[in-house]
Amino acid sequence: ATTLPCSERCMRDSKRTARSRRHSRRIDVPSSLTLRAYEELGETSELRAGSLQQLRSELATLVEQRVAGWEDLQRALEQCDLWLVRFLRTRKYDSARALHALRGNLSLSRYLEGLPARTGGAKPGAVAAVRFWDLHIEDSSVRYVLDRRLLATVPGRARDGSAVVLLSPSSDFLVAWGRLGVGGFTLAVLKLIEALSLEPRTQLCGITVVVDLRRASSALISTSLRPDMLRLTERLASLLGSKAAFRVRGLWIVGAPWYARAFVNLVRTFLSSKLRSRLHLCSAAEDLHAAVEERLLPAGFGAGGGADEGGAEASFEECLLALQRRESSTRTSLRSSSSSEPLVWQRPRHELSPT
């Protein structure tokens, strides 16, 4: 092995120490939630440090053994503590289960990367290959999803403290699948959910997923019932049930039309018993107010049904900053806050990017 000059080693070590300090500040849950983290997860700073060390050691062993998919495990090993601790917190610091969940996530990413371009009816050869590790918030596929509000979040939290993800399937999904490929589209969605899961409070309080089917067309539902799409849906349900790097606090399906009921019933069979107990089917959008305050939701989720975007007019980046700052979720506070504070997940700098 090549020996680095002393000056280079010192510079490298100082950068590594600086990164470690920066990540250690971010990894702690807010002081107001320290007791909850201990009661629910048994989390202490000593347990967290020891579990992270053990998880990294197990990953390093698998990489040395060149097991299947070791290249992805190497990339996972290079990630910051904040990226890895998600798997430990969702598995109550059981390192074996955390490693299993992490490998399941990587396996799903590889599966999505390898989906044929014709999946979901897309034209073969029309879709560019994409790697999950290479995605970032300025990637064209991620921006496509955000700019068309195919996935959104809100500038605040649900009543139980969880972050909120809004998926609004419509005919725009068919266009996105044709443009990005089903695999590329799903990878972009998972990358955005990952960004939310990097906030320590969200790692403890989880994520509430809202699927608004009120605009789902019959063409979209029939495409979703294709065998190749159902296999993908089953894999995603497995991720949410046992391999997710975040805690699913609730799964709300809003306004499913009559022709979507068969699809919804199929999805229910894919869910684990634990996740089925957290599934809420509601015909009226106002029913969602039991979980999320109306002021945080798009206007279409309110009793008045206004024309603007309501509380969700803020961009994904603004909402993410609001969650990170743990401030009020009103639009006013977002406008008055400094725009110079960097996002935790912002650009693909290899040594600082979560993926």
Image: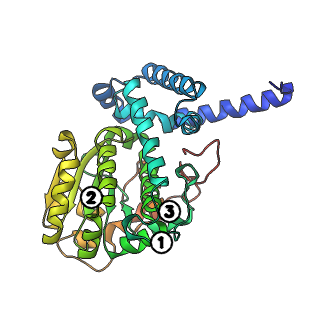
Instruction: Determine which residue is flagged by label 1.
Output: 179
User: Does 245 appear above or below 217?
Assistant: above
Q: Earlier in the sequence, mark 3 or mark 1?
A: 3
Residue 342: x, y in percent? 57, 52
Residue 212: x, y in percent? 25, 65
At 28% from the left edge and 29% from the top edge, which residue is drawn? 40
Going by the image, does 104 lie left or right of 345?
left
Q: Earlier in the sequence, mark 2 or mark 1?
A: 1
Going by the image, does 140 lie left or right of 176?
right
Quadrant (top left/top right/bottom left/bottom right) for the N terminus: top right
User: Does 122 appear above or below 30?
Assistant: below
Distance CA(mark 2)–CA(mark 1): 24 Å
Graded by Cα atoms within 10 Å as few (under 14), some (14 to 19) or many (20 or more), the crowding at tag 2 reads many
Distance CA(mark 3)–CA(mark 1): 12 Å
At 30% from the left edge and 62% from the top edge, which residue is drawn? 296
Amino acid at dot 2 = Val
- Of the two numbered discs 3 and 1 in the rendering, the one whose residue sits closer to the viewer: 1
Instruction: Determine which residue is flagged by label 3.
Output: 142
Amino acid at dot 3 = Val
Instruction: Determine which residue is flagged by label 2.
Output: 210
Residue 337: x, y in percent? 49, 59
